[in-house]
Image (cartoon, helix red, strand yellow):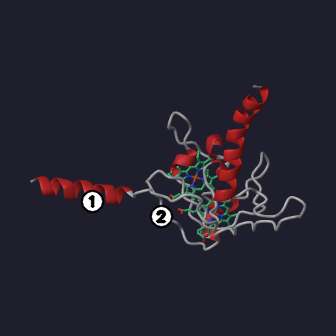
Amino acid sequence: MKHLRLAILAVPVFLATAAFAQNQVATLRNTAPLDQEGEATQIPGIVNTDIRQVRNYPDQPPLIPHKTDNYQVDLNSNKCLTCHSRTAVEVSQAPMISVTHFMNREGQTLGAVSPRRYFCNQCHVVQTNARPLVENEFVDVDKVIDYVKAQQGGAD
Ligand code: HEC
Ligand code: HEC
């Protein structure tokens, strides 16, 4: 009886192992044998084209189209603002932070960048050229509007 129970318990484990071997599920080690050091996966490159990217909806924080390596943002300094602040853009020719970045919670526009917009990387991110892990099925709102219009046109 004891042996039978053990055998029943072992079945799912065996099946799981078989499925694993069949699907070749990727692990962090890739296919490197346990006793050998595998090749490290490449760190994806950062998109540094300087070309401003489309926003997928009007109030999306725009993506950063340049590298930000070593751009320090802390209590004492903010490297981003050395190019993006109101007074810096004449020299840097970078787009100025928008007026929302001066607003406090109550919607009042302050004289300087609002503390809640100080840590730029909270909302703005660079892009990498990594292969997407899953398919992206996002549909732009313009396409949605066209679709709705076409449907309404068809109903008339
Ligand atoms: C040396 C100047 C410089 C610094 C420092 C800098 N930027 Fe920029 N940034 C630019 C310029 C110039 C552009 C316009 C596109 C381009 O040339 O890359 C830009 C574009 C952007 C955009 C795109 C805006 C849009 O409307 O599409 C974002 C977002 C941005 N930067 C965020 C940041 C953040 C966040 C930091 C700090 C981590 C930063 N930048 C630091 C010069 C700078
Ligand atoms: C809480 C999120 C948040 C933080 C923090 C933030 N931003 Fe933004 N940013 C946004 C959003 C959302 C937009 C687009 C809508 C708008 O203008 O408010 C934007 C727009 C921008 C734009 C484009 C402005 C334009 O008119 O085209 C630039 C440049 C920018 N941000 C730079 C910065 C920099 C530099 C910092 C840090 C000092 C920063 N942002 C901090 C959310 C944020």
Examine the rendering and report whether any part of residue 4 can be seen: yes
The kind of secondary structure element at disc 1 is helix
Rendered-image quadrant of the C terminus = bottom left
| Spot occupied by residue 140 in the image (x, y as percentages of width and height) | 39, 58
Along the viewing direction, whichever of 16 and 35 lies nearer the viewer: 16
Ligand 2 under 8 Å from disc 1 Cβ: no
- Residue 59 located left or right of residue 144: right
| 117 and 33: which is toward the camera | 33
Image quarter where the N terminus lies is top right
Reply above or below: 137 against 3.
Answer: below
Point 17% across, 53% down: residue: 152
Q: Amino acid at mark 2?
A: Val
Visible residue check, residue 25: no
Snapshot quadrant of residue 56:
bottom left
Q: Please name whichever residue, 105 or 19, is drawn nearer the observer in this view of the structure.
A: 19
Q: Is residue 23 left or right of residue 150?
A: right
Residue drawn at x 61%, y 62% is 64
In which quadrant of the rendered view does residue 78 lie? bottom right
Q: Position of residue 115 (x, y in %)?
A: 65, 41
Residue found 66% across the figure and 63% down from its top: 83
Q: Which mark is residue 146?
A: 1
Q: Disc 1 to disc 2, how far (Cα)?
A: 18 Å
Q: Which residue is under mark 2?
A: 54
First in sequence: mark 1 or mark 2?
Answer: 2
Q: Residue at x 81, y 64 (%)?
A: 32
Q: Amino acid at mark 1?
A: Asp
Left/right placement of residue 136 relative to residue 79 reads left
Disc 2 C-beta below 8 A from ligand 1: no
